Image (cartoon, rainbow, N blue to C red):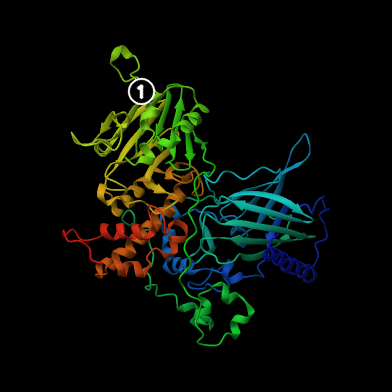
Amino acid sequence: MKRGHRLAVAAATGVAAAAVAILPAIAQQMPASTPGYDLSGEWAPRFHEDQPERIPGPEIGDYLGLPINAAARLHADSWDASILTLPEHQCKPHPSDYSPRGPANLRIWKEIDTASQQLLAYHTHISWQAPERTIWMDGRPHPPEFAAHTWQGFSTGVWDGDMLTITTTHLKMGWIRRNGIPRSDRAVVTEHLVRHDNYLTWIIVIDDPVYLTEPFIRTTNFVWDPHQQIAPYPCQIVEEIDRPQGVVPHHLPGQNPFLGEFPAKFGVSPEAARGGAETTYPDYQWRAKGAPAAPARESDPPAVAASASDGDVHVLPVQGNVFMLVGTGGANITMQAGDEGVLIVDASAATLTDKVLKAIRTVSTKPIRYIVDTDADADHVGGNADIAKQGAVISGGNMGQPYSGAAIIAHEKVLARMSAPTGEPSPFPQAAWPTDTYFTKKKELFFNGEAIEILHQPSAHTDGDSLVFFRRSDVVSAGDLFLTTTYPVIDLERGGNIQGIIAGLNTLLDITIPRDKQEGGTYVVPGHGRLCDEADLLEYRDMLTIVRDRIQDLVKKGATLDQVNAARPTLDYDRRYGTTSGPWTTDKFIEAVYKSLQPATGTKPSR
């Protein structure tokens, strides 16, 4: 156990012991189990800790006691509560690292293997938004890094004496405080549940490399309440405000008028109200007035995690007939398989072709009939020629017999990028070129009993991007319009534009429908990164819209590119999506957005 975690457990145990001494004991006692106390039962929250934050809600600008960095601070400064009126932001449950904060009437029950009578899992249900969670106790591993994330994450538990320790990964982006302080989807959460007779202390430790400089620790207490009844919590999305499509409420940097209210109302030092690890230690109050504060600029963002790091190509079942193939060095592949054969969206990099074919054959031995290219990038189309050669498509003619090779489908502008004018060398061999192109808004297929829409997205990553929607399986393949690893690549020379990318993401949001509590339902396979649903897509769209609005505001004020870079308009997202090295850096992204937003005067933007 980490030292900080041990200190938290010791402190929390003292709080629980004090609660037992102060509060009257409940007559009926639960027997102890081996190991640890049995945690099953009905629990009611105690609100002697942080009640104003937990129930009425935190004040805008109250970052006290939080070891946040400048990125988290800017994110919170920009947050506007009216974003919660957007339909896609409604009905989101508290993530598992926040839901115990309340209102949090809690039920815990066991899952026992009948044959062995071994404990397989604990399950929890919490009253607010009725999230249910599984804590696996059977030693199973956590999912691969490219698997989908959920509000409750993936949790495994082990007993440490009488304390249950839980490790949770695969969380969606959430919040540390409900006033805009974020918690990223790269966080790992460690929890310790300690029971003292009829009192339960829940200790939560958040390690977040994106928004925290130190682990953040908080505790919540519950009392055993066997007679409580938890009501159902249905949630229906409604249109609260009529807005144009794509509007994301937020405050531009330096323009949030409410940030000064909290320190003025409570007599708190404005600097302390801004949070930061240095303000959480006792000696902070003795720091000399006027002493310089810690620098706001963060260190370089951490390297972006690869989709799969072992060099192999992995197969992840999505839903219906659709699978996702993930391998380092190439784009994600979306595969549909059925009685008629195999269709893949993108063929990934040429270096991965043998592994891609091997992965496909673990799912289906049927012929590869179709390859759909979402763009003309080498990491998407590099495998076209060799994979198509292994396939065969029936497309009429030749007495209904298969033609040689799979059909390659793409927008006509992809063919233009991959071929070359007469007499000039082509960047790709002819066998890799699309054999079936379209030039309209969409192309339709019906394959393996499923309607498939191929939708052109103009002026996005490039001018030839396509989305592929598998309607019965309810899966969308997004190509490089949507990434979970980096800022989007805006290829200005090939017709890309930030406005087109945001428009394409709004189209994706129109297609996706969550199953329940903004989770599941329509799944989205990004060009690179992990499997997603609408909530993940929404975070990406909101991020890009906010960054676009910030840079657009600077452009309207006549700022040069150097001035825009100095303003750091992506600060709150750089540790998640940015990088200072490689083919697509944060500076290149900012420059592409800046040039996209220049007035169409024919003049080059100044530096």
Q: Secondary structure at mark 1?
A: loop
In front of the other: 497 or 179:
497
What residue occupies the far left of the structure in this picture?
A: 602
Q: Residue at x 78, y 39 (%)?
A: 117
Q: Is residue 532 above or below residue 259?
A: above
- Classify residue 338 as left or right of residue 197: left
In front of the other: 399 or 34:
399
Q: Classify 10 Å Cα crowding around label 1: few (below 14), some (14-19), many (20 and above).
A: many
The spot of residue 159 in percent (x, y) is: 75, 52
* Tag 1 residue: 405
The spot of residue 338 in percent (x, y) is: 46, 25
Q: In the picture, which quadrant includes the N terminus?
A: bottom right
- Tag count: 1
Write down the quadrant of residue 65 in the picture: bottom right
Amino acid type, residue under disc 1 in the picture: Gly
- Classify residue 413 as left or right of residue 295: left
What residue occupies the far top of the structure in this picture?
A: 399
Q: Residue at x 80, y 62 (%)?
A: 26
The answer to whether any part of residue 474 appears in the image is no
- Classify residue 87 as left or right of residue 34: left
Q: In the picture, which quadrant includes the C terminus?
A: bottom left
The answer to whether any part of residue 336 appears in the image is yes
The spot of residue 483 in percent (x, y) is: 42, 48
- Classify residue 182 as left or right of residue 7: left
The spot of residue 384 in percent (x, y) is: 36, 32
Q: Is residue 285 above or below residue 45?
A: below
